[in-house]
Amino acid sequence: MISLNNVHKSYVTGSNSLHVLKGIDLEIKSGEFVSIMGSSGSGKSTLLNILGILDNYDEGSYYLNGSLVKDMSEKKAAKLRNELVGFVFQSFNLISFKNALENVALPLYYQGVNRKKRNKIAEEYLDKVGLLDWATHLPSEMSGGQKQRVAIARSLISQPKIIFADEPTGALDTSTSYEVMDILKEINDDGITVILVTHEHDIASMTQKIVRLKDGRIDEIIKNGDLKNFQHRYAKELETA
Ligand SMILES: Nc1ncnc2c1ncn2[C@@H]1O[C@H](COP(=O)(O)OP(=O)(O)O)[C@@H](O)[C@H]1O
Ligand SMILES: [Mg+2]
């Protein structure tokens, strides 16, 4: 589903160039639940934006569902995004003057679906994230965890195959973080590939595969069975940091 080979990315500002990704090789199969973990500034968001075709890369190759994502026209990129991809962000990105139902229904509005139909479908997705009773509430009336659940429902309404989530629990306290992780896990159980970015090792350890970024490279990939070992080692690293 996702295949990267030797992907490089630099940001050029004026005469300065910052080499952020220095040769990323990565395979992610359909149905996986993956976290990309690394310290602040390690290039996690850069990598996720490339995966979600929100940004370009400089060298190497990226295949998404068999299509080479490189120098793609915006039209083709938009088509791929619409067919395959949903996004969830740390800051929820809800529209403040629209209620929960309208926020969830928004992608369907852009697809030209009439109000009655889109509201009915949005209700199903609000129900899925346990917020049907909150349909008429504005984001300002909701907790951070609830807002993120609305954002997740909105990301699901276009029936994506992959959800990309950039620090989805970054603005939440521990218990609401777990609520959001539970929903992402449920979505994954429904067969959707979930790829999230986090700098928190306890969030990462709730996923099946941890891709650890360090100095622009993949430092290691930790699979389900090795998570205990990973937590142990990571704790040691923190002690000596
Ligand atoms: N648009 C940009 N222009 C210039 N530098 C950027 C841009 N986006 C990110 N960077 C820099 O690239 C590095 C990696 O950023 P990012 O991918 O956001 O890291 P992370 O998400 O792991 O915190 C950081 O040093 C950041 O300042
Ligand atoms: Mg980031």
Image (tube, rainbow, N blue to C red):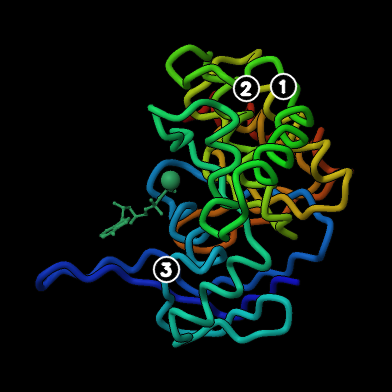
Q: Is residue 219 left or right of residue 129?
A: left
Q: Are marks 2 and 3 in contact (CB under 8 Å)?
A: no
Amino acid bearing label 2: Ala
Q: Residue furthest left?
A: 14
Question: At numbered mark 3, what does the secondary structure look like: helix, strand or loop?
Answer: loop
- Up the image or down, 228 lies above or below 161; here it is above
Q: Report the disc number at residue 132.
A: 1
**Residue ID for mark 2:** 135
Amino acid bearing label 3: Asp
- Residue at (22, 71) in percent of width and height: 12
Q: Nearer the viewer, residue 34 or 216?
A: 34
Q: Report the disc number at residue 64.
A: none
Residue 65 screen position, x and y as percent: 73, 77
Residue 227 screen position, x and y as percent: 80, 38
**Residue ID for mark 3:** 55
- Residue at (75, 60) in percent of width and height: 161
Label 1 and label 2: CA atoms lie apart by: 5 Å
Amino acid bearing label 1: Leu
Quarter containing the N terminus: bottom right
- Up the image or down, 44 lies above or below 205; here it is below
Q: Residues within 10 Å of mark 3 (few under 14, many from 20)?
A: few
Q: Are marks 1 and 2 in contact (CB under 8 Å)?
A: yes
> Which picture quadrant has residue 140?
top left
